[in-house]
Image (cartoon, coloured by chain):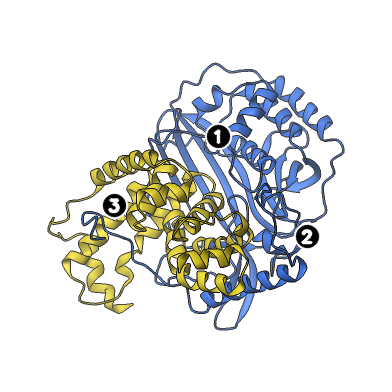
Chain colours: A yellow, B blue
Amino acid sequence: MTTDLRARIRAGDREAFAELYDAHVRAIYNHGFRLTADWSMAEDVVSDTFLQAWRLRARLDPEAGSLRPWLFGIATNIARNLRRGDRRYRAAVLAATRDLPIVEDHAAVTDSRIDDARRLTAAMTALAALPRADREVFTLCVWEELDYAAAAEALGIPIGTVRSRLSRARRKIRRELPAPDRPVTGDSTTTTRHTGGLR
Amino acid sequence: MTQHPDLPSPPRRDLPPGRQEFHKQRLMSVIDHETRIAPTPPRARRQSWLIRPVFALPALALIVAGATAIVAARHDTGGGTSQVITEPAQFADPHAGSPRGVARLANRMALVAETRENKPAPTGGWVYIRNKTTEFYVAQNDDTHTRTPTARASIRQVWTSLDGKKGWLIQSGIGQREGGETLDSDGGATLNGPSYQLLAALPTDPDALLSRIYRETRGHGTGPDSEAFATIGDLLGESYPPAKLYPALYRAAAKIPGVLVVDDAVDATGRHGVALARVDESGLRQELIFDKTDYTFLGSREVRTNDLEEIKAGTVTFSSAILQRALVDRMKQIPAA
């Protein structure tokens, strides 16, 4: 079935692109956010990714399997070009993580959820400090759950490079993360829980 | 997620209401349009999409180069303390710029730069840059249903250690946390985010410099020449090039195909200067602006040369102005003006 879609995409079938869009738009949007730390830019990534997929359709390998690595490869490249320089990215990460998961205004947020929130902020901040190449591998493999071969295909690099970049990235990020089971103390995160319902 | 129980995933979101459909319709209309113009599928195998002539649609221009985010509808997540500083959008002549006189101007700039003394290696351990940037966006008022071209302004103060591994940023207008934030990184400096040490080690021969720029930016941006020109801007911008590098930067810029002279360009603080400029594949004119008499680098600007949906030709989509450049002894130390 996927092969079939692939063939139709290569042939420039309009409906195939509509299907492709519907199936992947959300994933590309979220992937765009992780690479740019900016939801507006993530929207630009969505728009440009599918347009470019259309333009690059003839170059699509007729044989391979899922179209996800191909799309993620295009999206990664676009995100790369949208935000020149790591400094701007890091500034955006910090701005983005401030209102990240606690934005959900459930009054009864569990402690483990708050803990996740804090750990996520730490993870994104640590991610921002990584070289871009490591960051891309990390988001594809860990957050998009692409396997090594698919990530290698997306980024156009050897599998061994994916593996080494990923282990380096995870090592560094783990080092920055608070332990998952650490009890939540009375910090600003807890305060946010009580005010959350007021939004 | 079950694979990596130790690492939380960011929450997933849907596109804002209506936007998912909006982008789909646009994709479909591009497909319909191009199918009508070119009924046979393009043979793109040997052809880069970047180099293909933009005969069909401004849609290609959506693949916007560089740092400028074109935001058609900002969706504020609400509740944040974004403290956005806005100014009226700026506009410029979309047709400005001539290829004549590029070499002459660059030569004059280089000659003036060569008379500057080459100071010994800096003793302070930190580069301090204060600059102003503006970014264009269309502000949408959901109550009155009006859309206003606007510029979002920001003052940035950046301290960077000479090796680029440590840094601090204080930036207004982005809702930054009190006191600023670290820019520490062990990722190392690049041509697009150069440390003092990287700049000091660059070749001062224009051809050698240019070929290094092309080599290290291969595959970035909307095209090799655009990216080379943008990279010269990055080297001149939030950076501290040693005096000996300036002549090479100017001469290298003039050697990039497609470079223009814009006689009158305006930086983010309203200072007028002369610019070396280049229009990239998306129709964005990137301008590097210099003082008209001593050719000090003032800042940069990006001007649309064609309409991109509601962003009209002539819109300044990004501008910057270097306000202060100094070496200081400590991080967060503010030098005398």
Q: Amino acid at mark 3?
A: Ala
Does residue A95 appear in this view? Answer: yes
Q: Residue at x 75, y 71 (%)?
A: B36
Q: Position of residue B205 (x, y in %)?
A: 67, 20
From the viewer's perspective, tell me whether residue A190 is left or right of residue B288. Answer: left
Q: Position of residue B33 (x, y in %)?
A: 72, 71
Q: Quadrant of the C terminus of chain B?
A: top right
Q: How many marks?
A: 3
Task: State whether discs 2 and 1 lie on one chain.
Answer: yes
Contact between labelled residues 1 and 2, with CB atoms less than 8 Å apart: no
Label 3, on which residue?
A122
Determine the CA span between mark 2 and mark 3: 47 Å
Q: Amino acid at mark 2?
A: Phe
In the depicted structure, whether residue A176 falls above or below residue A13: above
Residue A132 appears in which quarter of the rendering? top left
Task: State whether discs 2 and 3 lie on one chain.
Answer: no
Q: Position of residue B244 (x, y in %)?
A: 64, 21
Determine the CA span between mark 2 and mark 1: 33 Å
Q: Position of residue A15 (x, y in %)?
A: 58, 75
Q: Chain of mark 3?
A: A
From the viewer's perspective, tell me whether residue B256 is left or right of residue B77. Answer: right
Label 2, on which residue?
B55
Q: Nearer the viewer, mark 2 or mark 1?
A: 2
Categorize mark 2 by other alpha carbons within 10 Å: few (<14), some (14-19), many (20+).
few
Q: Quadrant of the N terminus of chain B?
A: bottom left
Q: Secondary structure at mark 2?
A: loop
Label 1, on which residue?
B191
